[in-house]
Amino acid sequence: MSVVIDIASWILLLGGSAFLLTGGIGLLRMPDLFTRLHAASLTDTMGAGLIVIGLALQAGLTLVTVKLLLILAFLFFTSPTATHALARTALLSGYSPRLTRSVGDDGAA
Amino acid sequence: MFAAATIGILVTMAMALTRAFMGPTVYDRILAVNVFGTKTVLLIAVLGFLAGRPEFLDIALVYALISFIGTVAVLRFVRHGRQSRRTRADESNEQESLI
Amino acid sequence: MIDVVDIVLLLFLAATGIAVVVLRNLFAVVMLTGLFSLLSAGFFVVTDAVDVAFTEASVGAGITTVLMLRTLALSTRKEKRTGPPALLPLGVVLVTGAALIYGTLDMPHYGDPAAPIHRHVAPRYLEESMDEVGMPNVVTSVLASYRGYDTLGETTVIFTAGIGVLLLLAGRRKRNGQEKSR
């Protein structure tokens, strides 16, 4: 039984790390603020969720798991809200998304 | 397995740091700091398990809340701080030069 | 593995410090200072000082960033370009730093139990703390009871600094409010 839990934890932790790395690469390589926002926030939340569940499987049914699930709940609620606030502020401050593929500023990938 | 997750999180933190150094506009930097905050939360959780002392999760909880509040506060400042400081003419001149 | 995390976090700290000095856009510098606080708090967690990390997180990553942004609204956005590099101060700093590093070569090893610092009052604090103060955390008992005057002085300093900052910011905001309501 513990072997099953270990294998599940391995898969979840590695999957979460892969999502986080994908988000990081997207943060570096995407050409525009809004595309970077999209790449970073979606993979952020998903990777965090997978890693936290993988850790909770390792901890079993203790107080540590309750704290981990609280962290997960907070991240689920606050990360998309912060992303929305950032996108809205950027849009309202006059930063329009780049809709055509043009070379020049900002290192178009 | 915790070592692999730790290395993945550290590499992602390096990438977020690079974006914070490079980002041409202020929103890129705010995004990078937000991502960095979430990664710090995960790093503390995984490090707690790596060192065999998962009781450090309280501080990860505190970070998750504080980084969110900090991001929203910075965004409110960016939105309203500019308007209360500049006149209309200055604002329309500023829209090309995004800080 | 923990050593690798230590080294990587310290490298990030150094890189962020260099970026704070090199960048001239003050907004970016404020965000990077928040990042610096997050990194140092992570470093404190790695070295087992969790209460210090709590304080660093709430003060550095949250409040200091917001206060510096409020202050930034009162001044310019870009740092002024400085004059030609000053070589004499650089030389003085390098010589002093080299002398200090040379002085540290003589110190005992980190954590050496035979070092003088561990033989004076530290054994007494460690042994008598539970009876005299009754707190299981020795760091807290040293801060709050054995060296209480220290803590009182620090709290006074921080309180004064906080009042000063609030007075500075409140005065300007009143003036801005009168401008806006024209």
Image: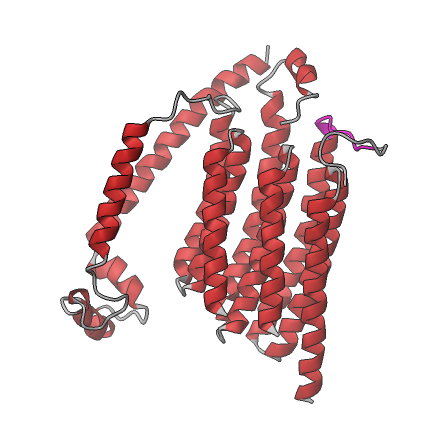
Pick the front one: A31 or C87: C87
Outermost residue on the right side: it is A100
* Mark count: 0
Q: Is residue C93 above or below residue C149?
A: above
Give the magenta range: A92-98
- From the viewer's perspective, is A31 left or right of B86? right
- From the viewer's perspective, is A21 left or right of C152? right
Coloring applied to the structure: secondary structure
Residue C27 included in the magenta stretch of the image:
no
Residue C57 in picture, x, y percent from top left? 47, 51
Quadrant of the frame with the N terminus of chain A: bottom right
- From the viewer's perspective, is A96 left or right of C120? right
Residue A37 in picture, x, y percent from top left? 72, 44
The residue at 63%/55% (across/down) is B12
Residue A96 included in the magenta stretch of the image:
yes
The residue at 42%/58% (across/down) is C44
Pick the front one: C3 or A44: C3
Q: Is residue C37 above or below residue A15?
A: above
Quadrant of residue C127 within the rendered picture: bottom left
Residue A97 in picture, x, y percent from top left? 79, 33
- From the viewer's perspective, is C69 left or right of A30? left
Overall secondary structure of the magenta section: loop
Quadrant of residue B72 within the rendered picture: top right
Q: Is residue C46 above or below residue A108?
A: below
Quadrant of the frame with the C terminus of chain A: top right
The residue at 53%/65% (across/down) is B57
Pick the front one: C45 or A81: C45
The answer to whether residue B68 shows anywhere in this view is no
The answer to whether residue C24 shows anywhere in this view is yes
Residue C104 in picture, x, y percent from top left? 23, 56
Outermost residue on the bottom side: it is A1
The residue at 75%/29% (across/down) is A104
